[in-house]
């Protein structure tokens, strides 16, 4: 992650990861670097759990490996035309991101079942639904569980960035805020406001 101190996030990076709950999972394999994409769940034990299809090229290499989880939040293109003096600036992006690095271990069948239950308990209420594994036909549930592998990552490093024009003047930040609101990018505007303490 780019180490610019101006953009260090003051927000809890694990809370951000839990809220966004979807990651790019990177690891080095004998075939070179590979990436998978999966939802994440943070457990009370301080681990981050996820599951992948057994057909995923990363799955057979993760148990015992070191992996990097990259969780991205909303991002906003920033036009130089929004600054007081556009001739002095170039286009950029404001964005939020968290990286979590750690060792990975595969879960056994019971822990995988618990992970799937926790997944439903966590994500179904977010969309106003109540699905559980109990609603799945038993033979289908058995086949689905055999087709995936669960993993737990124990974090050894957590890094975060929240780039929201903190390196710009107050006047330019207010101009950016107004421009983002005008184009309907409420999330981008709110990120500028939050980092400025407005």
Image (tube, rainbow, N blue to C red):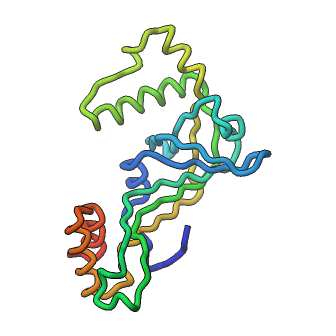
Image coordinates for residue 183, horizontal then vertical, percent: 24, 65
Task: Identify whether 90 is placed above or below 119.
Answer: below
Looking at the image, which is closer to me, 91 or 136? 91
Task: Identify whether 175 is placed above or below 134.
Answer: below
User: Residue shown at 39%/70% (left/top)?
Assistant: 94
Give the number of marks. 0
Say left or right for 5 vs 127: right
User: Residue shown at 74%/46% (left/top)?
Assistant: 29
Task: Identify whether 57 is placed above or below 136.
Answer: below
User: Residue shown at 59%/30% (left/top)?
Assistant: 53
Q: Quadrant of residue 174?
A: bottom left
Say left or right for 84 vs 145: left
Q: Quadrant of residue 74?
A: bottom left
Q: Hey, which residue is sitting farthest right in the picture?
A: 30
User: Residue shown at 45%/44% (left/top)?
Assistant: 42
Say left or right for 10 vs 146: left
Task: Identify whether 91 is placed above or below 110.
Answer: below
Where, quadrant-wise, is the C terminus in this rendering?
Answer: bottom left
Where, quadrant-wise, is the N terminus in this rendering?
Answer: bottom right
Image coordinates for residue 168, horizontal then vertical, percent: 35, 85
Image coordinates for residue 82, horizontal then vertical, percent: 29, 80
Q: Quadrant of residue 83?
A: bottom left
């Amino acid at each position: 992650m780019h180490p610019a101190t101006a953009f260090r996030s003051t927000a809890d990076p694990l809370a951000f990861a839990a809220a966004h709950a979807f990651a790019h999972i990177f690891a080095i394999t004998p075939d070179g670097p590979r990436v998978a994409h999966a939802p994440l769940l943070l457990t009370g034990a301080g681990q981050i759990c996820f599951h992948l299809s057994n057909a995923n090229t990363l799955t057979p290499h993760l148990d015992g490996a070191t992996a990097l989880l990259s969780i991205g939040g909303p991002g906003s293109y920033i036009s130089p035309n929004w600054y007081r003096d556009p001739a002095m600036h170039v286009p950029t992006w404001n964005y939020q991101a968290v990286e979590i690095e750690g060792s990975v271990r595969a879960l056994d069948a019971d822990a995988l079942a618990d992970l799937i239950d926790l997944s439903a308990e966590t994500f179904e209420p977010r969309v106003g639904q109540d699905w559980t594994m109990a609603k799945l036909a038993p033979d289908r549930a058995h086949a689905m569980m055999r087709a995936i592998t669960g993993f737990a990552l124990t974090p050894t490093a957590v890094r975060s960035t929240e780039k929201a024009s903190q390196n710009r003047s107050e006047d330019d930040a207010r101009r950016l805020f107004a421009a983002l609101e005008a184009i309907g990018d409420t999330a981008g505007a709110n990120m500028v406001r939050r980092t400025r303490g407005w």
